[in-house]
Every structure is written in structure tokens, then in C-alpha cells.
Amino acid sequence: MSRILSRLVIVTSLMVFCAGVASGAGSAIDKGSVIIGGGAAFSSLGGDLYEDGDGNGVTILLFAPECGAFVTSHLALSGQLIIGQLKRGDDKLYAIGVGPRLRYYFGQKSQSGSLKGTTYPYLTGAFVWGQYNDEDNDKHTATAFSFGGGITHMMANSVGLFAEVNYRADKFKQADKDSESGTSINLMAGFTLFLWE
């Protein structure tokens, strides 16, 4: 648990740092612009691969808040926090993790000053270290790597809604057992606040 807490401190420090670098950006996707946002994903998995002996499938619910800054024009580096729940029948796992995320936005900077209606496609990659607890409160470790793409549509000068598809590879390690791994394709949706004005 101490590793998770130290990573949370790092993410919090990044958020405080981000609040101080927002000035000086000429556009939402320009160097110095800060992004704060979050997304959510829901998955329901069934069939022989995912169902237990009683026919219970797997449901997954994830929340992913993040904070970061554009380190160069179009390229943002952020820290993200992942909070999730996996459920099959009466069995539940709770997970928390932190890690870095990169996003590269395509498109032109606004020349008129108004971004409302602008759509920015992007590519993204992330890595997460985490911990999950089962119902017996046994703690286990997890890592995940993801990459994908999406679009952010600007609803106002500083607020965008995003939709993203990503491929994720997960690895879970229980104490005294071999690690297990799996992959998934996920659809995420959420909002992004750009602090640049």
C-alpha cells in the first residue's frame, strides 16, 4: 500500500505543478497549456471465456482522472489515477493505480481565438502500476499498458468532450502464484479541461 500512496503523492504534486504552468500558452494544444480531465469506461464480458460455472459474466467499471501539461506543441504528458471494480457473480475485485500518459493531438492551433466546435484527433499511450484487493482483502499487484486513439470535440473555448478506443494489456500477480495476463479493447468517454487563456 505504501507504493500506491507514494504514487498518489507524485500525481498530486504533478497536479499542483500543472496549476502553475498554464500561463503563456497561445492555444489549447500549445506548450504550457494544462489539461485536467477524466473518463469512465464500462465493460460487460460474457461467453465461455469469461463466465463462471453458474453463467455469471464479468463486468468492469473504471474511472480515470488525470492532470498534465503540454511539454511541446501538440504533445501532452499527464499523470493519471485509475480506480476500478471487476465483478463476476458475488466476487468483486477493487483496483487502484497510477502512471504516466502521453497524448499527441493533431490539428491546427486556432487563429481566431475561439476553439468552440474544433475537433482534435489524438493518439495516446499509458502505463499504470497498481494494486487490487479481492473480497478476502488480500492485496495483489497489477500493471497495464495501453495505446489507442480518439477525438476531443471542443464544446467551449476550454472544455472538450472526448471519445477514445484503446487496446490494453493487463498483468495481475497474486502472492505465491504465477502471474496472469489478458488483453482488452476499451471505449472511454469523458471530458478535458484545457487551461491556456
Image (cartoon, helix red, strand yellow):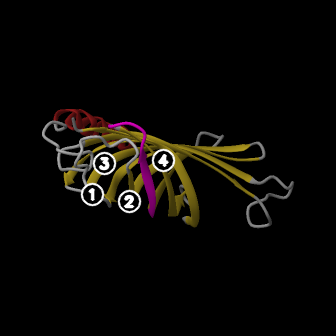
Q: Which residue is mark 4?
A: 131
- Which badge, 3 or 4, is on the more N-terminal residue? 3
N-terminal label among 3 and 1? 3
Q: What element does badge 1 sit on?
A: loop
Q: CA distance from mark 1 to mark 2?
A: 12 Å
Decide which of 197, 92 is in the foreground and name it: 197
Which is more toward the observer, 128 or 193?
193
Q: Which mark is residue 137?
A: none
Mark 3 → mark 2, Cα distance in angstroms:
14 Å
First of labels 1, 2 by sequence position: 1
Tell me the CA gap for discs 3 and 1.
21 Å
Q: Amino acid at mark 4?
A: Gln
Question: Which numbered disc covers residue 78?
Answer: 3
Observer-nearest residue: 108 or 174?
108
State which tag comes first along the sequence, 1 or 4.
Answer: 1
- Which residue is rendered at x = 33% and y = 57% of the image? 103
Number of residues whose C-alpha sits closer than 10 Å to that of mark 1, classed few (under 14), some (14–19) or many (20 or more): few
User: Does the magenta portion include 40?
Assistant: no
Give the magenta range. 147-157
Determine if residue 95 is in view: no
